Image (cartoon, grey):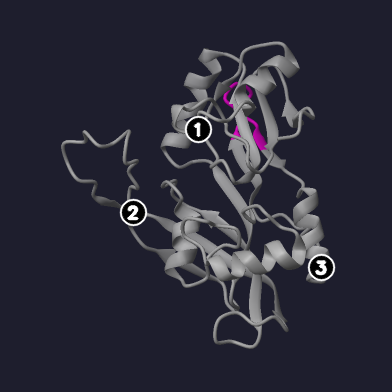
Amino acid sequence: MSEQPLSILYRDESLVVVNKPAGMLVHRSWLDKGETRFVMQTLRDQIGQHVYPLHRLDKPTSGVLVFALSSEVASLMMPQFAQGQIKKAYYAVVRGWITEAGRLDYPLVEEQDKIADKKASQPPTAKPAVTDYQPLASVELPIATGRYATSRYSLVAMQPQTGRKHQLRRHMHHLSHPIIGDTTHGDGRHNRVFREHFHCHQLLLHANEMQFIHPVSAETVKVQAPLDTTWQRVLSALEWDVPCTTSLA
């Protein structure tokens, strides 16, 4: 992980928002003992004050990540996340062609950790999970995968309406359009295509935008996170324009 400072997208007396790099944990976890750099500690040292995480992004996911600058602000802000009032938008590159916008309403059983959840008294139950998605671009490449002579991919925008663990990755897998670079719910053959042809070794899932009500001023705040160099290289290689329009109304 690079030692470069985090990119700060928004900051005031109450909140700070960063563009989380792909492959970086939000905070220390005994499940990833080998990691040495974390967003929470790096940001604290960078701005010289404690920060309070309000939500999380998976380690391989990049993009908008919001912190409070006091426990009081965190307490004011958390209900927006808990009650699903935060608007979020993502970009992803997926296997196959998606030709029409849609909404997937497909409940998900919470994924349990084999170690942390081994003492759970009750098996997890399925909870509502809803994702909106829209196709932005598509391509067919003369690269054979499996029994097919070519490979098809799509760039999609997604807006999760609920916040289940790995929701977008699992929902796209359910649609048979797994996200490129997903080593848990993805397709290893297509992940290999992107590693070998585009030098892409990361999950192509990016939290590009978030909109919320400021917990102190009550004003609407909209923050966007630029795509990293790997994303830009992949989009350029596929001759796709970098998305420049907002995904949230």
Magenta-drawn stretch contains 92: no
Circle 2/circle 1 CB separation < 8 Å: no
Closer to the N terminus: mark 2 or mark 3? 2
* Residue 153 location, quadrant: bottom right
- Label 3 sits on what residue type? Ala
Q: Is residue 121 left or right of residue 231?
A: left
Circle nearer the viewer, 2 or 1: 1
Q: Is residue 125 visible?
A: yes
Whether residue 195 is situated above or below residue 120 in the rendered picture = below
The magenta region covers 213-221
Question: Which residue was labeled with disc 2?
Answer: 128
User: How far is disc 2 from disc 1 in space, using C-alphas?
Assistant: 29 Å
Image quadrant assignment for residue 235: bottom right
Q: Position of residue 141 (x, y in %)?
A: 72, 80
Identity of the residue furthest to the left in this view: 121
Nearest the viewer among 17 and 247 is: 17
How far is disc 2 from disc 3 in space, using C-alphas? 37 Å
Question: Which quadrant holds the C terminus?
Answer: bottom right
**Which sits earlier in the primary sequence, circle 1 or circle 3?**
1
- Outermost residue to the top: 49
Mark 1 vs mark 3, CA separation in Å = 33 Å
Q: Which residue is mark 3?
A: 237
Residue at the spot 73% in from the left edge and 25% down from the top edge = 11
Q: Is residue 165 left or right of residue 150?
A: left
- Residue 192's quadrant in the figure? bottom right
Q: Who's the residue at 46% across and 71% down the image?
A: 175
Q: Which residue is mark 1?
A: 32
